[in-house]
Amino acid sequence: AQKITQTQPGMFVQEKEAVTLDCTYDTSDQSYGLFWYKQPSSGEMIFLIYQGSYDEQNATEGRYSLNFQKARKSANLVISASQLGDSAMYFCAMREGGNTGRRALTFGSGTRLQVQP
Amino acid sequence: DGGITQSPKYLFRKEGQNVTLSCEQNLNHDAMYWYRQDPGQGLRLIYYSQIVNDFQKGDIAEGYSVSREKKESFPLTVTSAQKNPTAFYLCASSGNRGIYSNQPQHFGDGTRLSIL
C-alpha cells in the first residue's frame, strides 16, 4: 500500500525567508507522480507543483521548487521568499502507477505553514 | 471560465436521512473523484470514476453511493448508513491522458456537511 508521510504538523517562517516542507513516500511502483497542493482557510485545493518519478530535473514553478530524492523517497517542497499569503495547509500527494486504472491521489496529513511578518 | 462547481456549500443532515452533494465540471475531464477531509487531516478517497457509467470504490466507500450518468456530473449521496458524516467533502476531476501525465486534479470549493 502506498503512503505519504508529512512529519511537520506546523511550521513557522519569517516573511521573505525560505522554508522547506518535508514529504516522504512509500511505493513499490516504478512509475508514479508527486504533487503538492495548498489549502487556504477557505478550503479550496490549489495545485502548486508536480514531479514525475522519471523526471531527472527537480521541478520548479515560480517560488516553488521540489527537492526530489528518489533513492530516499522524499519530495520536499521549498518555498522561497515567503509571503504572508503563503500561510495555509500544504499537502503532499502521490498518484498511483501500475495498471489498476486508479489515478486518484493519496494524500499526506498536511503541514500548516504560518508566515510571520 | 472552466472549473468544478460543488453545491451546496453547507449542508445539514438529520438522523436517518440521505443527502446528495452535487459536483459539476465543464473541463471536459473524463475522470472524477470524491474525497473526504476531516479536521486537521488529509484527504481520503471515497469513490472515483474514470469514465461515464463506470465508478469504483475508494478507500472509505462504506455509507456512500455515487452515479456517473453524464460526463459533467458526479453526485455523491451520503446515506444513513454513514454514521459519522460530518466532514468537508471535495470533488475533483482530471484528464485521462495516462498515468505518466503531469495533469493535476482540479478541485471544487467543497461542501461542509454537519449532522443536526
Image (tube, rainbow, N blue to C red):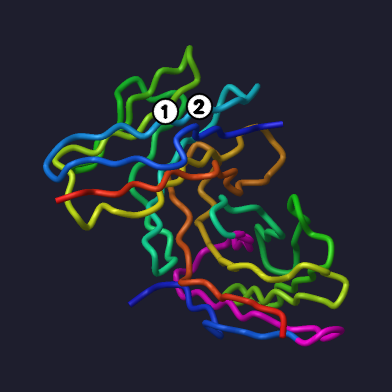
Rendered image quadrant of residue A66? top left
SS type, badge 2: strand
Q: Which residue is mark 1?
A: A75
Question: Label 2 amino acid?
Answer: Thr
Residue A94 on image: x %, y %: 53, 38
What residue is drawn where x is 40% and y is 57%?
A39
Q: A56 or A18: which is nearer to us?
A: A18
Q: A65 or A84: which is nearer to us?
A: A84
Residue A41 on image: x %, y %: 39, 64
- Mark 2 closeness class: few <14, some 14–19, many ≥20 residues within 10 Å: many
Chain under disc 2: A
What residue is drawn where x is 23% and y is 48%?
A115
- Locate the N terminus of chain B by quadrant: bottom left
Q: Which residue is mark 2?
A: A24
From the viewer's perspective, is B85 left or right of A41?
A: right
From the viewer's perspective, is A85 left or right of B97?
A: left
SS type, badge 1: strand
Question: Label 1 amino acid?
Answer: Ala
